[in-house]
């Protein structure tokens, strides 16, 4: 049971939020990006592979993989930066910055999240297939 007082308080809070919605959203976005900026700073503000410093293409990379599993564990993606920032501040060496290009190259090399490259070592067994010949001709497979 809620008392009339609690009801009034709830209504007041709801009303206050409605009237200041934009303020809260802006604050949230600011905090979210601020956390990202701090993470970037702590990770050196540049791609660990090629040294690119363009923040628009830099991404937080899990050095040993496991990004998807972590995403699932955290659930709320807005909590992600807070979670990662805390870990880095506590001395975690699990993260690095990679530019989008280097990240894709790493994924390709590590066969992460790409079905095609995951089975690439088996492609040779299909060397009679048209698609294998195309991949070979185009330099996608050795
Ligand atoms: Zn790079």
Image (spheres, grey):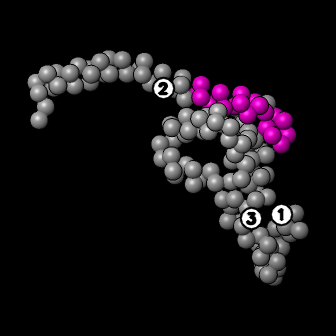
Eye-nearest disc, 1 or 2: 2
Q: In which quarter of the image is the C terminus?
A: bottom right
Nearer to me, 112 or 141: 112
Eye-nearest disc, 3 or 1: 3
Sort mark 2 into few (<14), some (14-19) or many (20+) by Cα contacts within 10 Å. Answer: few
Secondary structure beneath label 3: helix
Residue 42 is one of the magenta-drawn residues: yes
Q: Residue lying furthest front in this view?
A: 90
The residue depicted at 59 percent of the width and 29 percent of the height is 35
Residue 122 on image: x %, y %:
77, 76
Residue 67 is one of the magenta-drawn residues: no
On the rendered structure, is 129 left or right of 4? right
Q: According to the image, label 2 marks what residue?
A: 28
On the rendered structure, is 18 left or right of 41? left
Q: In this view, does 133 lie above or below 20?
A: below
The residue depicted at 77 percent of the width and 31 percent of the height is 44
Q: Are marks 2 and 3 in contact (CB under 8 Å)?
A: no
Q: According to the image, label 1 marks what residue?
A: 140
In 3D space, how far apart are the residues under numbered discs 1 and 2 (Cα atoms)? 44 Å
Q: Earlier in the sequence, mark 2 or mark 3?
A: 2
Q: According to the image, label 3 marks what residue?
A: 117
Query: Does the image show residue 81?
Result: no
Residue 123 on image: x %, y %:
78, 75
In 3D space, how far apart are the residues under numbered discs 3 and 1 (Cα atoms)? 10 Å
Nearer to me, 4 or 123: 4
Secondary structure beneath label 2: helix
Q: In this view, does 131 lie above or below 18?
A: below
């Amino acid at each position: 049971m809620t008392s009339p007082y609690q009801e009034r308080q709830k209504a007041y809070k709801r009303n206050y939020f409605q009237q200041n919605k934009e303020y809260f959203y802006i604050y949230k976005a600011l905090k979210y990006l601020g956390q990202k900026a701090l993470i970037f700073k702590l990770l050196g503000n540049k791609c660990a592979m090629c040294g690119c410093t363009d923040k628009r293409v830099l991404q937080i990379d899990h050095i040993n993989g496991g990004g998807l599993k972590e995403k699932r564990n955290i659930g709320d993606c807005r909590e992600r930066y807070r979670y990662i920032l805390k870990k880095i501040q506590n001395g975690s060496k699990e993260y690095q910055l990679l530019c989008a290009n280097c990240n894709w190259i790493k994924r390709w090399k590590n066969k992460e999240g790409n079905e095609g490259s995951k089975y690439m070592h088996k492609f040779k067994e299909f060397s009679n297939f048209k698609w294998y010949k195309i991949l070979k001709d185009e330099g996608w497979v050795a």
